[in-house]
Image: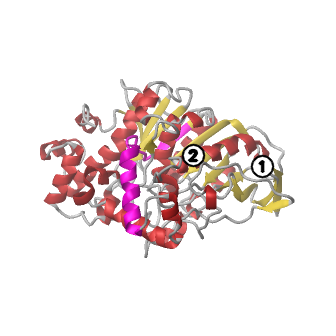
Amino acid sequence: MHAETRLGAGRVRGLAKDGYAVFRGIPYAQPPVGALRFEIPQPALSWDGVRDATVPSPGCWQPTAPGDPLAGHYGPASMGGDCLTLDVWTPDPTGAVTGLPVMVWIHGGGFATGAGSAPIHEGSSYARDGVVYVAINYRLNVDGFLPVADRPTNLGLRDQVAALVWVRENIAAFGGDPDNVTVFGQSAGGVSVMNLLAMPSAQGLFRRAIVQSGCSMTAVPLAQARQATDRLAEFLGVPATVDGFASVDPVATQAAVLRFLFEFNDVEQWGAASFLVSPYRTVIDGDSLPQDVLTSLAAGASADVEVMAGTTRDETTGFLAVLGRLQYDERFAGHALDAFGLTHDDLDVYRKASRPDADLPELIQAAWTDYAFRIPTLRLLEAHQGPHHAYEFHWQSPALPPGWGADHALEVPFVHDNLAGFPRESGLLGENPPQHLATAMHKAWVSFARGRGPGWDPYDTKSRVTMRFDADNYGPLPDLAGAERQLWEGRR
């Protein structure tokens, strides 16, 4: 069956099934091609008749890693210039309901890969629970997160703001309440949410925000960001200009994007910056992002927004695996400790507090997790002047090697309550992942979006209550991993 509704730009026809409706590939801005490629997103043009919204649109240009078992689940089915689109799941296929809470999902991928339209981000569980769910695509890598001379910066972030403006203007057509929007995202999506909290153009576009595995210190000054632009241009053999990048075929460009992504993780070449994983980052430009996130929040930005933020316990195990560092490597450990501002003696804090049997690689990943994810997340909450909650995901998949712990992105299928839809061939969740944990996490996220809180006390600098999500031992705890947290006091 089909479902139809009218938007500001024209009518759209989606699919109605199982008590909800889904609309795919709706443009929220004009395609960023030709003269618009490195420009601020422009409002979508209107259309005549009824636009088909039953299939996803192409994802934004991005590289694909050969042999990646998750590429078809986290990435788009196809790529192209007409990518500034979004998908909507609504529990109201008839158009008769109003005032439903809205949740807008921003996908991760290091600002280099990913798509909101990917299968792993489908939103039927939210529609099932009475939420209008929106998943967006936005410009990536060179088009979205490398500054090009004489063009606006932070184009991927500006795309996200344009999508939120579209939601405010159109979501009522799907039964959603434009005054009750929660924006949430993981990894680069979590970083995006942090940045949106500090962006003047995003103020007033959402009431709540959920940050999953973000980092509040990834934004860099313009001069530093342009070093990355220059390096990618070197890979392509062109000037770091609009004309230079336009002269290269998109497929060839994305091959260089991937090559640079791997090079950036070479600590011997890029130093401490490589421990923030991706060279594709947001820019403190004095305009779209006037200052760093923590400074903005401490000054009162988004004080009227409720925030929930957290991480997994072992964010960086997978990064160590990709770098081939899961075995003892004193040279790499030295570089890591220098970047973190720690010593080998400091690692004993982790061993004594919570990891008595850990070897050096596990201790390094624990410190790396704190450096790049957990401590920046806690500092975000401490800087935020409004209400906020904290969580940490601890479930360790039995399918992963011993010691991997709760790796980066492992919580996503639990938050989406989509264990059955997660690709079992990836080997990440095992045969019987705990459905009760997915039920609990999804319930907390939806409750938060409804304005009822997630189900545990707010985080403050006195009690530091943090919700621990695990299969058997979960619940709110005061100052979770407090000894490790104290190690970082006074450090970056």
Other-residue count near label 2 (Cα within 10 Å), few / some / many at <14 / 14–19 / ≥20: many
What amino acid type is highlighted by mark number 2?
Answer: Arg
Q: Position of residue 140 (x, y in %)?
A: 51, 57
Mark 2 or mark 1, earlier in chain: 1
Between tags 2 and 1, which lies in front? 2
Say if the magenta span includes residue 229: yes
Q: Is residue 419 left or right of residue 32?
A: left
Region rendered in magenta: 209-237
Under circle 1, the secondary element is loop
Residue 15: image quadrant is: bottom right
Residue farthest to the bottom? 67
Provide the residue designation for mark 1.
Answer: 92
Q: Looking at the picture, how far across and down is residue 471, in whole percent?
A: 43, 51
Instruction: State the image coordinates of residue 69 (x, y, percent, origin top left).
Output: 46, 72
In whole angstroms, how far apart are the C-alphas of marks 2 and 1? 29 Å
Whether residue 406 is visible here, answered yes or no, is: no
Q: Is residue 160 magenta?
A: no
Residue pointed to by mark 2: 158
Q: Nearer the viewer, residue 13 or 350?
A: 13
Position of the N terminus, as image quadrant, is bottom right
